[in-house]
Amino acid sequence: MELLIALLIGILFSAGTYMILSRRLLRIIFGTSLLSNGTLLFLMTSGKLQRGESPILGKLSTTYTDPLPQAMILTAIVISFATTAFCLVLAYRTYQEIGSDDVDELLGKEHDDDH
Amino acid sequence: MLFILTLIPFVASFFLILIHRFIKTKLGWVVIPVPIILFLFYLGMLPQTLTGKTISTHLSWIPILNISLSFEINGLSLFFALLISFVGILVILYSIYYLSERERLANFYVFLLLFMGAMLGVVTSNNLMLLYLFWELTSISSFLLIGFWFEKERSRYGAQKALLITVSGGFCMLIAFLLLGNIAGTFEINELLNSYDSIRQSTLYPAIAILLLIGAFTKSAQVPFHIWLPSAMEAPTPISCYLHSATMVKAGIFLIARFTPLLGDTILWNTTITFVGLSSLLFGSFIALRQKDLKALLAYSTISQLGLILCLFGIGTEAAIFAGLFHLLNHSAFKGSLFLMTGMVDHETGTRDLTLLHGLGKAMPYTGAIAFIASFSMAGLPPFSGFLSKELFFEAASEAPLHGLAYLGNFAYIIPVIAVLASLFTFVYSLHLFGTVFLGKEVSSSTPKNPHEAPIGMLAPTMFLVILNILVSLFPNAIAQALIAPAALTVSGSLPEIHIMFWHGFTVPLMMTIVVVIGGAILYSQLFAWKNKFNKLRCSVSANQIYDSCLYALPKVTGRFTNFYMTGSLTNYLSYIIIACLLLVSYPILHYGFITAVSTKDLAHIELIEVVMMIVTATAAILAAKMKKRVTAILAMGIVGYMVAMFFVMFGAPDLALTQLLVETVTLILYVLVLKQFPLGMDPHTPSNSKKRTINIFISLCVGLSVAFLSLFSHSNRLYESISWFYTAFSKSKGGGSNVVNVTLVDFRGLDTLGEITVLCLAALSIYVVLHLFTDKSGTVQAISDTAYLDDDATYLKDYTEANASPVTLMQKNHQKDNDLVILTFSKPVSFIILFVSIYLLLAGHNAPGGGFIAGLMTSCALLLMYITIGKDFMSHIPFKVGLFLPLGLSIVGGCGLLSIYFHKPFLTQTFGHILLPWFGKIELASALIFDIGVYFVVLGTVMSILFNIGKTES
């Protein structure tokens, strides 16, 4: 199972990286979303997968899945939502101010050699 | 004590910065006690060094790097320290009259004190790193002082040149110091001698010697690094006198003298120093002849005289070193007074041009007398002190082929020849200097100002230096015994028997002097005949041209290199970052052979449904990357997100699954809201750069591969025991809840969660700011007020009241285009159901799946459903501002944490207890619930304010 998930993580990261290397702002943001999904699975695999019941303590079971990565992932999900929202708004405002969503058209001015 | 002495100038300069505004008199009078005190203190140490004793202090500073504040006074350093403080007194006194009150006097004296402290630090420090520190500080203060009149382009050029050359030399010296410290295992200079043999036998000895000498040569303006000294003459004349003739340029000589006991007396050391010194001696005296500017003449003369002293150190016999130190003293006296004299001439006539200055002797008799004594001393004529040291020089030079440099064979006879030749030129330019300026018929009309005698304040310090000259020539042996002998003892370890006198009989040195005087007299009488021819000579390549072209070319080349990779393109920068990360990750993998460290044991088994899910997710991800239409891309992204949630279900993580599902939903709404604002299409405009696309695909695949490997690697290699058992074991007993994930978040790791929700608040705030600020045409940043949006609503509401329609018809009027009646009807009850479920999840979260994060997201979903169906004016239906949830939630969480402090427990300690309620039975209540409610409000506030703010700006 871990092999399979590792493959999936690889695919998610490849797709995400490819997207953030493109020139359109929206695609870059989508790329970060894919990357963060890959990261969630990565964290999940770093614990052991599927060992026992979900970590709600009860009388039925004595083995539970690892709760520590889960707590971290929960935090990660919410934070990545906030940052995605921020990136989106930033991209939107950039487009509004500059009139382009192509990062190669957002180049600053050449620096003067005199300064 | 020594440490405090060294600190005095720095402390004084610091206070000068603070108080100079309140001082009404000329600043120099306030500053002048500093060198006087220093001079007296150092003078008090003289009796001790006479007997060969040293005074030292040691203060630990950075012990781990062997750097300490250790100082040592020996004969050599005391000689220099006295010279520095004595000339310092005179120069400050002189400057009081030289600089007008309109100048930036505070700058001047602060820099001067800084220099004085640094220079004293150089000569007294006993730690290599400390020495380096002070060494560079002298370069920096010299830079500041040369650029004192920074309005002038030449000043800035000269200052930069001096700094670049001396600091590069200092850098070489630093390398030498580090090598020395590495071999000896200490940076303490007196301890280095313990490793005498290992240093000399080291294969690095040549490198150490050469690098150290480069440092010394750059500082002492020796050929070919001499070019900075003439340019440094842009400094005020007192500075030229102090830094660029009497003290700082002698730091190089000091360095060589200080390290002669350790590194000296080898063929490499002696030959290099001798010939660099000789060439500077000859070159400087030769070029000095063709200068028109008085100060430039003196600058080249300084280069030449420093070369003379170095040459003596190169010959390296006891007598030669003694002669070198003796000449150093004489040079400081006569060259210092000549500089000060030049300053007076410049001050009173307004020019330093030798072609304009004639016959000033009548108008400035005292200055003339000073110039007479100083220049004849420099020419090496009896009965002045210069003659004494020149005789010693000739003696050492003529004996160099026998003692000292005997290994050079007959070639060593070039030394006395060059010595005579250079002295001949020195003789001529010294006469030229005095004769042209002060003798002959007075031509007052040629100078900008009508010349008259300089004020007493300037004459007096110059007189002092001249008197020093005369004293040396009157009592050469007494002064040599008191000052020079202890210094020479420090350098060469023993003292030669020297009795300085004017008349030795008809010896070789006297013959050489006679040749110089006769030859010089002939040359001087024909001066104007051959000077014009000589001035026409031009060297095809000069050191200055090389410097200038380097100065021009270096920024060009580096600029071109920088522009090559700093393209300004985000895509490129990202590639650099990613490639760097890839290298960081892949290097250890390949280098340590981690590939084999992945074990396929202990894996979870695979079920068919998981394979299917994996294929679906992977396909969706690849599609999302390939899609050209954004709606399809968003749908593909959604699939990936929901599938990840499904994986969480499979892996026994209900809380995660719930959170992920809700976040995915909210994100989709977010995309839809923002998407309208963006142009259609997402593919790159230019399909032509397929090469770049191939590179990108390659980079992406590498990233994927390495991350996949890392995940397997981290799974199969655990360096430490997992700490997860703690959370499972104590969740119930210490946290009072069965949902381990939730207890971890709100109790065990409460501070992390507090940090996290703070980040959420910040994100919401940032989004608010980004949306509400804009730059207007004039370039100033302005804010769009909330009321601008509300105004829209207000007009809208006004329309509505005028039409006197019911809210339902209004809603229908506005939204019938978008939403059908079924959604409109059902959205409200459905929203309320979701709302209730979310509150249940919030309260149950401690023991069952749920909690503040999930409940907050779910409540947001309920509100968003209403928002979507009703539209923009949904905002006006909410009786409170969603933004207020943020501070509310944070305060609840913070208050909950502070409450535990009230009970004398650490911040954010949680407690729980059991309450018996009718109907419900025994209920467990934890204070963590309050914490969770705070989290709930923050999440709710964040999501709502983000989405509402984006929604509001829809155009």
Image: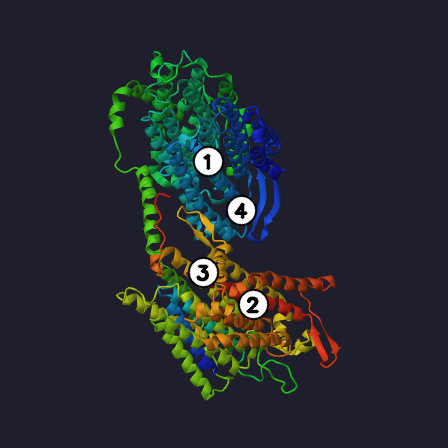
Q: Residue at x 45, y 78 (%)?
A: A6
The image quarter containing residue B630 is bottom left
Chain of the residue under the numbered disc 1 shown in the image: B
Percent of width and height locating residue B88: 52, 28
Type of amino acid under label 4 = Leu
Classify B523 as above or below A55. Answer: above
- Residue indicated by mark 2: B940
Name which of mark 4 and mark 2 comes first in the sequence. Answer: 4
Which corner quadrant holds the C terminus of chain B? bottom left
Name which of mark 1 and mark 4 comes first in the sequence. Answer: 1
Give whichever of A106, B101 is nearer the camera. Answer: A106
- Residue indicated by mark 1: B144
- Residue indicated by mark 4: B193
Label 2 near label 1: C-beta < 8 Å? no
Closest to the camera, between mark 3 and mark 2, is 3
Type of amino acid under label 1 = Leu
Classify B135 as above or below B565. Answer: above
Which corner quadrant holds the N terminus of chain B? top right
Label 2 near label 4: C-beta < 8 Å? no
Q: Is residue B597 visible?
A: no
Distance from label 1 to label 3 (Cα)?
Answer: 55 Å
Q: Evaluate whether label 4 is on the same chain as label 2.
A: yes
